[in-house]
Amino acid sequence: MNLRHRRLAVAQISRTELKRYLQDRIALFTTFLMPVLLIILIGSAAGSAPDEFVVGVLDADGSATSEQLVASLDDARAISVVTYDDEQELRRDIRLSLLSAGLVFPPGLSTSVDAGDEVALGLLTTQADQSAPSVIAAVNGAVADEGGRLAAAVFVEQQTSSSLAEAQAAVDAVDGSVPPAQVEVSTTGTARQEDENAFTGAATSQLTLFVFANGLFAAASLVESRRLGVSRRALSTPIGSGTLLTGLAGGRFSLAVLQAGLLLVIGALWFGVAWGSPTATTALVVVYCLVATGAGMLLGAVARTADQAIAIGVPLAIGTAMLGGTMWPLDVVGPVMRVIGHVMPQAWAMDAWSAIVNDGAGLSDVALEIAVLAGYALAFLVAGSWALQRKLTH
């Protein structure tokens, strides 16, 4: 066969492999629909900090002082107060995410304030709530404002020998006439896109997870092709094993590029993701698709049945994705797990995505990550082609 005929044969085999895979409705769901659904769910769950936090307040003191503190919280710009009479109901609504936090005023609060003693207030929130630091800061600010008012009233009481109520009235009377302190705020650097658009992190992680996962899942059709003798019959023609293997790899590479391209377009048009440098993004997508192609080829050569390929591929895809940082950033794990995570190609892809979309990195800035991924791709493709050729010729 001349070069032109070999190219036509490769293209035909690739088209046939891609068509066979896309005829499977389950494969269509895991390849295209599931990643989009997960981007919506994860991005919506992460969200961004709300403009106003709903805080439940349980006033066990019931005094004028505690009522004034509740009113001060409700007047705060970032807080909306909902009052409760039962602590169990308060805790339940926090668990159900109906409240951003809960604040408990203990009995005897006013007595302690009148005596000038320090009072500890119980602030309830959940560790899983990413907005917890923001709501804590908002509540602390509102409580601190009221604390300053009470401190001023105590000072007036001590200096004028008036009652605390009269001192508080005097402080309230002059409160509006005192101009607030002016604070100039300047921002240095650039905000991370993942912080401004929660769908960005979800889009990059799901693209990384599913391109590799579906590369592994596509191994089942390769095993089935072997079982039915399709590949062996193809070898009996003049195309040769090299042309056949290139065509098989081409079909899987086309599938990975199709999936990645679709997620890039949906991410940009639907979720507003700015993918950064086109050159860097294209290079990263191409080399990562080659990684997924090689991994699928290797699994397709090793597995004996299609069911075995799926049985191996699913936990392998999930396990490597977890270790590689597609389900949580590797920044939150210890140094040992970070090193282990970077044994997985997903970790290098996630590092590159973070640099491109968050830091505006270009191709030269992610050259190391792309080079490492190219090494994975070469290793997988060589090992998979060698193993598959042995299976077909022995």
Image (cartoon, rainbow, N blue to C red):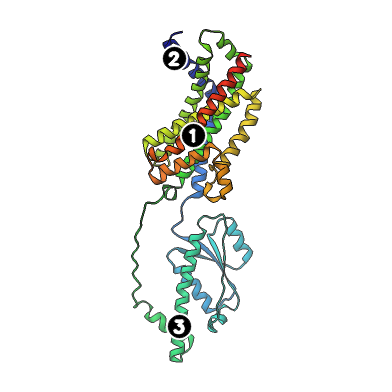
The crowding category of the residue bearing disc 1, from other C-alpha atoms within 10 Å (few below 14, some 14 to 19, many at least 20), is: many
What element does badge 3 sit on? helix
Q: Do the numbered discs 1 and 2 sit on residues whose CB atoms are within 8 Å?
A: no
Of pointers 1 and 2, the one earlier in the residue sequence: 2
- Kindly report which numbered mark, 1 or 3, lies closer to the viewer in this rendering: 1
Q: Which one is nearer the viewer's eye here, 177 or 227?
A: 227
Q: Nearer the viewer, residue 62 or 345?
A: 345
Q: Position of residue 369 (x, y in %)?
A: 46, 38
Residue 24 in view (yes/no): no
Label placed on residue 7 = 2
Of helix, strand and loop, which one carries label 2? helix
Mark nearer the N terminus (1 vs 3): 3
Front residue (pair 257, 144): 257
Disc 2: CA contacts within 10 A as few (<14), some (14-19) or many (>=20): some
Q: Residues within 10 Å of mark 3 (few under 14, many from 20)?
A: many
Q: SS of the residue at dot 1?
A: helix
Tag nearer the camera, 1 or 2: 1
Instruction: Please give the name of the residue rendered at 46% of the width and 56% of the height, measured from the top-left corner.
Output: 50
The Cα–Cα distance between marks 2 and 3, rounded to whole angstroms, is 88 Å
Q: CA distance from mark 1 to mark 3?
A: 66 Å
Q: Amino acid at mark 1?
A: Leu
Tell me if residue 238 comes above or below residue 91 in the rendering. above
Residue that numbered label 3 is attached to: 153
x then y, percent, for residue 131: 50, 57
Specify the amino acid type for callout 2: Arg
Give the label on residue 373, or none.
1
Give the percent coordinates (x, y) of residue 198.
Answer: 46, 47
Kindly identify the residue that appears in the image at 57 percent across and 77 percent down: 109
For badge 3, the amino acid type reads: Ala
x and y percentages locating residue 323 in the rendered image: 58, 42
